[in-house]
Image (cartoon, helix red, strand yellow):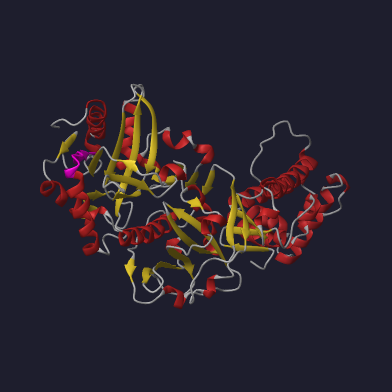
Amino acid sequence: MKESFYFHDDTVILNYSKQYVTSKHGIIHTDVFDAFLDGFLVYLEKNHYDLYKYLEKDGLKNHERIKKEIKFVLTALLVEAPSEIHDEYINFPTIFEDIIEQGYSYWRSLQRYSVLYTTNESGFSDQSFLAADAKVNERIRELYRSLQERIQGENRVYRQLQAGTNAAMLLSYYEPELPAGYEKLSHIPYVAKISLRTPLILHPKFNKRTNKFTDTTVNPMDEFIPGDEEWICYPAMVGTMLIYCYFHRNYISSCVSMANLFELASKEDTKNRKPDAIMLFGNPDGKKDTTFYHDEVNDIWIGKNSAAPEIDYFGYTKKSVLTLHNLAMMKKGWLPIHGAMVNIYLKDGTKKGLMFMGDSGAGKSETLEALSTLASDMIDHQETVFDDMGTLHLDANGKIRGQGTEIGAFVRLDDLDKGTAYKDMDRSIFFNPEKSNARVVIPAAPHSVVTTEHPVDIFLYANNYTDKRGMHFFKTREEAEPVFVEGKRFALGTTQESGLSTTFFANPFGPMQRQEECQVLIDKMFDALFDQDIPVGEVYTCLGLPNKGNHGIDEGAAALLDFVKNGKKDI
């Protein structure tokens, strides 16, 4: 990013490498403050016309004259009392104070980010990187308080709001291992460090995903538009896969949110290693593409999301990344599982690895929440392996093992226990919490746990549509496999689907697009599950029934708890 700042809709990016304020006085005379006033005056005219008319003074001032006079009065207020300032804006100090309050609120309503560039991140200690952003936060807050107290007098209650940025990124340049044909990506900076001011509340334009990811015969690199220093790369460790996720700056919120869901790869993680996949998010090509492509020569999977208002939803980012991961994993011979896995440790020393499968809204996370509530006095602790996407594979000894992808959980607030979303509130990222289908990204597990090979003690399909309660075990692979392959669920409106629907293997993110290749892996893993006498069955979550089956999910959780304590029975 070559500019000192960048405004886009309700987002502002501050480039500390180009301009860094050193005093509260200096803020008023920066280019970004001037641009902020442009947006603020439009906001006032639309939402607080009485205040706008006060500044306009009967239409005698245009925006440039209003901005000039506002900056004059603000500068004067930092050194003089209102009674000593000879300007008509201060004739009614309480009205001007209201304008200052509205300006401060408008600034904080924006999604605010900062970037700092370096050719070698070791040149910046964690302390200096964090301190740089913290000082800007302090200066903006000091400016507001100085202006407020000059007009109204001494404060007695101080609220330490995040007046500066919501997140800051240290961006580094290094030479990635990219093959010929990928030169357009070689000069894009990588996220080396990231700082989140949590709880972070974001307001994307959309709150559900309406697309499908489709195969294309055209390499998205041929259509990539690099622009003029407009992209940022988040190098992600998705499970054991290295995926370079390139974001156009208009979608910086999605880039920042990655930090709560996917492990940020270090420079050492990328050394002498080509990426398994590449994602291009927000490509300004004028299309509506959400596509993927396999570069067979270099064995790299490439995904593209064209710039569009509807992709301003973190679900697009997450599922694009996971689709690429799943396609790469299937080629490796591992079976992607759309579901959840946890290790349950009871206080009596019992430990079980529980794996669930089911499409969005099936009740995977909710069942685990119900289990935690039901058995709070018996469970010592839980260890999350994955909360949405993982894999089944055979280890070196031929044993079934599970592995995860994400270090966090991207879940619906509506489907969680009231207190669950808030117990980790100080570390969470919320998306449109005031709307239906609101989401939150909650940190869930260390990357070392996610990538460990975990034994699987039970494998369950989350059935949200059948009017039954508890659990049911299948006796044979021939009885079990069709249920999992059909992928039936009652869609709850979290995507473009509604009502009873089916999705191949309950996984529209790779397996559905590569059904033949996936079926071979399904047969192999189900043979192993039954050969190794691992219980395979259904848990009835009832989420698609009226009134959620009178909270039937609790009966499913109770049956699951009985299995954890006593082992498999005829349920």
| Residue depicted at 57% across the width and 74% down the height | 227
Q: In the figure, residue 61 lies in which quadrant?
A: bottom right
Q: In the drawing, does residue 528 fall left or right of residue 386?
A: left
Q: Is residue 500 visible?
A: no
Task: Tell me where residue 345 appears, x and y as whole percent.
Answer: 35, 29
Q: Is residue 210 visible?
A: yes
Q: In the drawing, does residue 313 fall left or right of residue 163?
A: left
Task: Give yes or no for residue 532 being in the magenta stretch.
Answer: yes
- Nearer to us in this view, 386 or 551: 386
Task: Tell me where residue 190 appears, x and y as whole percent.
Answer: 57, 61
The correct choice, above or below, for 319 with respect to 284 in the image is above
> How many numbered marks appear?
0
Task: Give yes or no for residue 164 being in the magenta stretch.
Answer: no
**The residue positioned farthest toward the right in the image shown:** 84
Q: In the figure, residue 541 lies in which quadrant?
A: top left
Q: Quadrant of the N terminus?
A: bottom right
| Residue depicted at 16% across the width and 50% down the height | 481
- Nearer to us in this view, 330 or 416: 330
Residue range (magenta): 530-541
